[in-house]
Amino acid sequence: MGSDPTVTFAPWEIAVEVPHGTTLLEAADQRDVGIEALCGGNGLCGTCAVEVEAKDPPLSPLDPDEKTVLDEEELAAGYRLGCQATVEGDVSAFVPASSRSEGEIVMTEGAEIDFEHDPAIRRFQLAFEGPTLEDTLPDRERVIKALTEEYGLDIDTVDRVALTDLPSTIRDGKTDGKFRVTATVAEETEILGVDPGRTGPAYGLAIDIGTTTLAIYLLELRTGEVEAVDSKINPQSTHGGDIISRVQYSTQKPEGKSELQREIREAVNDSIDTVTDEADVDPQSVYEAVFVGNTAMHHLFLGINAGAVAATPYVPANRARLKTTARELDLAMNPSGAVSWLPIIGGWVGPDFVADLLAAGVLDRDETVLAIDIGTNGEIAVSGPEQTYVASAPAGPALEGAEITHGVRAKPGAIEAVSLDPETWAPDLEVIGDESPMGICGSGIIDVVAQLFLVGGINRRGRLIDPEDGRGRIREGGDGSRDFVLVDAEEADVDEDIIVSQDDIRDIQNAKAAIQTGTNVLLEEAGIESVDRLVMAGGFGNYIDPESAKLLGLYPEVDVDAVEFLGNAAGYGAMYALLNRDAKAEADHIVSAVEYVELAAWDGFHDLFMEAMYLPHRDFDRYPSIKERVEAAQGRPAEEL
């Protein structure tokens, strides 16, 4: 028969010589080409489907299993089952993403996070004999038996809703005298659904409910691909931009709790409709959702009374990971779908920060790490060689641009970055969308305060200097308050000057002091004087200029190169929990392994907070690089600042 044929696998261009009669799957295994084969190569699942590029490839003829498992479109495109098609000559095969069994998934939306791809939800193709007068095994047990025999699964539960349609679905899939169906299974132990014939992939949702925004990701579970993303403003914001206002609304209004729950659930369902429509995915094929959010969002979404969370001693209703079904929460996905909220550490340190720590792998690092998620409520973790300590700091909304005189959300026309000329203090602005400025978002207000401190527009206590020394940009009102004029009215897209007031600066100082004090408390608890790496989590943290944050003392003396930005780490952590079945248990381990510190109960917290109100701190020597930089910029010693 001549020399051995060569099989070339794309997109890697990996070639392998194999004997005649070798299956494509066996050829792939010889060179560690990752092709999925959930049924073990028995021609049942279709996960090993590859596209053969030649029109008349030197392969064995199509067998009955291939004609059953592959649909007409796939057959017309040249797809073959890798476990059934045998090689009779040189052939090239393209392995689509849906058939690749690659060890790691890399998510690149602001950060690269590598982990093993092993989702809890999988679909299994089955072919089994139907009942007869001699074989009256019930339908439920018949499906379980097929899963055990063909895939080695140990099924102990069938979802109630899945059971209601089971008799009809398995009979609708009858072809060639056999029942051919697709079983959707969770954790290899529970059947969530059975569909006639061969169905497409199963999908999952990673959902991050923030105080301000809602972000939702639709993922194809077998490949780990993000199919669509949607984000929107949390509709509960109409009842208060901060958490406390919202919790008070839920407890003080007769229908407040149910109203807030209805609003956020409707918003989630609206986003599910958006992402499934965009990806052209049937919502019935969405079989899992993992939720994260702060403790209050967790309670309000689930309809749990959140009043105790907002009052001392800030105790949540539960800490453990919550597991339920989509139908219990009226979610716009398969009613049998598995739904979970990651666990709560304590107080205001909720599932979102657990997801941050999970995504960043903080507890697994050898170096000393400070992790901060900046938001209305700031969460902090200090992880040393012996123990990880966590706390929440009430930063308030100022760092995100809220409750600032001309504060706006990050949108076209918002000033997002500012630098001041060291001599004239003339501002150089970056405006979202290159439009006329109409306000300042969070990253912009942090830049302004940091730049004013650097050039000498404010002293270390944060007070604006006398107008006569303010380069024509500091003015004093009739009540004695002072403002810094950032943009003159004629240059703005509003009918007045865009200013930064003394109160605005004080709000930023308070927020900074909360984060800094919380960090210092945890460092003291851990017995750590310095950290090797700073991890900034949260979508907002991704936009902060690290130099500006360092000037204010928002984080300890750390080289800018040692600052790591993770973007929406909470969303990434939810995706991790969706795509790796062990990640949820890892989240549970984080909760049990860390030590929660309640800052309000920490002796001396008030004194530390007052010291942190200084820029960057009352003890300037804690920040030697900032001290040197400010002294050089202003040409005078620190004692005069």
Image (cartoon, helix red, strand yellow):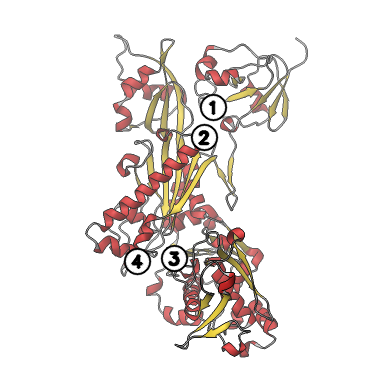
What residue would you read off at disc 2?
A: 222
Query: Does the CB distance between marks 3 and 1 fall below 8 Å?
Result: no
- Label 4, label 3: how many angstroms apart (C-alpha)? 10 Å
Question: To which residue does mark 3 refer?
Answer: 376
Tell me the kind of residue under disc 2: Arg
Query: Of the numbered discs in the image, which one, if any, rests on residue 244?
Result: 4
Residue 29, image x, y percentages: 64, 27
Q: Report the amino acid beneath label 3.
A: Thr
Q: Residues within 10 Å of mark 1 (few under 14, many from 20)?
A: many
Q: Work out whether 348 lies above or below 337.
A: below
Viewer-proximal residue among 143 and 499: 499
Q: Position of residue 75 (x, y in %)?
A: 57, 18
Going from N to C along the chain, the mark reached first, 4 or 2, is 2
Which comes sooner in the sequence, label 1 or label 4? Answer: 1
Residue under pointer 1: 47
Q: Element type at marker 1?
A: loop
Dot placed on the residue nearer the N-terminal end, 3 or 2: 2
Q: Residues within 10 Å of mark 2 (few under 14, many from 20)?
A: many
What amino acid is at disc 1?
Thr
